[in-house]
Amino acid sequence: MGKYTDQVTTVAEMKTLVQKFMEARKWEQGHTPKNLAMSIAIEAAELMEHFQWGDREDFTAEKLGPEKIDEIRLEAADVMIYMLSFCRSLGIDLAEAVQDKMEKNEIRFPADVERKAD
């Protein structure tokens, strides 16, 4: 498998990578939109566990360290793998959906309105 990076890998390539993995294991039957949506939530909860009991300043890359960052990185990958499968199962173009949502967010959250940071 070649080196995938955010700078050169398309969403379609990632969808294909995940699809081939699932097909080789004959997992398609269980990967319904409902099951995939639930799996996204479960994996997102596992990602959140890494941040459950700390303050904002506890969660810098320096304080977390490389081992913890790697655990978090793999949990983020689990969320994305299920999201890619979910979108493929319903024929959702993820890049287009993100663009559409950002356009709606531009209207909902104008850049010239000052907001208080948490």
Image (tube, rainbow, N blue to C red):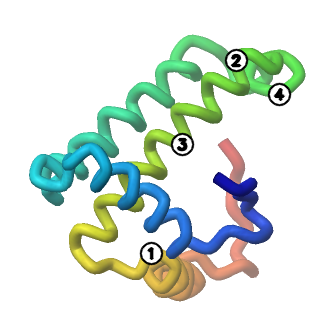
Mark 4: amino acid: Ala
Image disc number at residue 77: 3
User: Quick one: SS at disc 1?
Assistant: helix
Mark 3: amino acid: Ala
Alpha carbons under labels 4 and 1: distance apart: 28 Å
Q: Against 36, is 107 above or below?
A: below
Q: Earlier in the sequence, mark 2 or mark 3?
A: 2
**Residue 102 location, quadrant:** bottom right
Q: Against 56, is 63 above or below?
A: above
For disc 1, the marked residue is 94
Residue 35 pos. (x, y %)? 16, 47
- Asked if marks 1 and 3 touch (Cβ < 8 Å), the reply is no
For disc 4, the marked residue is 61
Image disc number at residue 68: 2
Alpha carbons under labels 1 and 2: distance apart: 29 Å
Residue at image position (56%, 12%) is 53
